[in-house]
Image: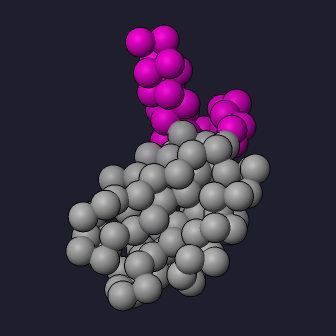
Amino acid sequence: VKRSKSTFEKCLHRLLTLLLNITLPCARTKTLHMQAPFNFPAMIPLWMFPIACTAGNTFVMKPSEKDPGACMMLAQLASEAGLPDGVLNIIHGGKESVDFICDDTDIRAVSFVVS
């Protein structure tokens, strides 16, 4: 419960900062990664990266090689909405890209969907 409260407070602080231009102390804490599935190329990323970025984290998103367009459009929309450069990052590729991400010690969490 304490961790959930802390996460909620970070999200709230970040939302206030982004929406109302109120600066509150909320440092980026982690780099997170998500492997977007081909069968839900927009829905799953939308469940994850807005909350992760709002909580002050950086986010690495790897779209499916079969359907990378949705993730690219989401990244473009996030950029147009004012998300700072370097907060949401896209990496393309196959197994080599996934291995690179999984071996990177700066990435603190990895999410993927198996279907």
Q: State the image coordinates of residue 14 (x, y, percent, origin top left).
A: 55, 40
**Residue at left offset 46%, top offset 81%:** 72
Looking at the image, which residue sits at the far top? Answer: 2
Q: State the image coordinates of residue 90 (x, y, percent, origin top left).
A: 57, 74
The answer to whether residue 78 is above or below residue 11 is: below
The secondary structure that dominates the magenta segment is helix
For residue 50, say whether it is visible. Answer: no
The answer to whether residue 87 is above or below residue 78 is: above
Q: Nearer the viewer, residue 45 or 62?
A: 62
For residue 54, say whether it is visible. Answer: yes
The quarter holding residue 89 reads bottom right
Residue 32 lies left or right of residue 7; in this view the side is right
Q: State the image coordinates of residue 24 (x, y, percent, origin top left).
A: 66, 32
Q: Nearer the viewer, residue 109 or 54?
A: 109
Rendered-image quadrant of the C terminus: bottom left
The quarter holding residue 5 reads top left
**Residue at left offset 24%, top offset 74%:** 39
Q: Is residue 21 magenta?
A: yes
**Residue at left offset 64%, top offset 67%:** 99
Q: Which residues are magenta?
A: 1-29
**Residue at left offset 55%, top offset 57%:** 33
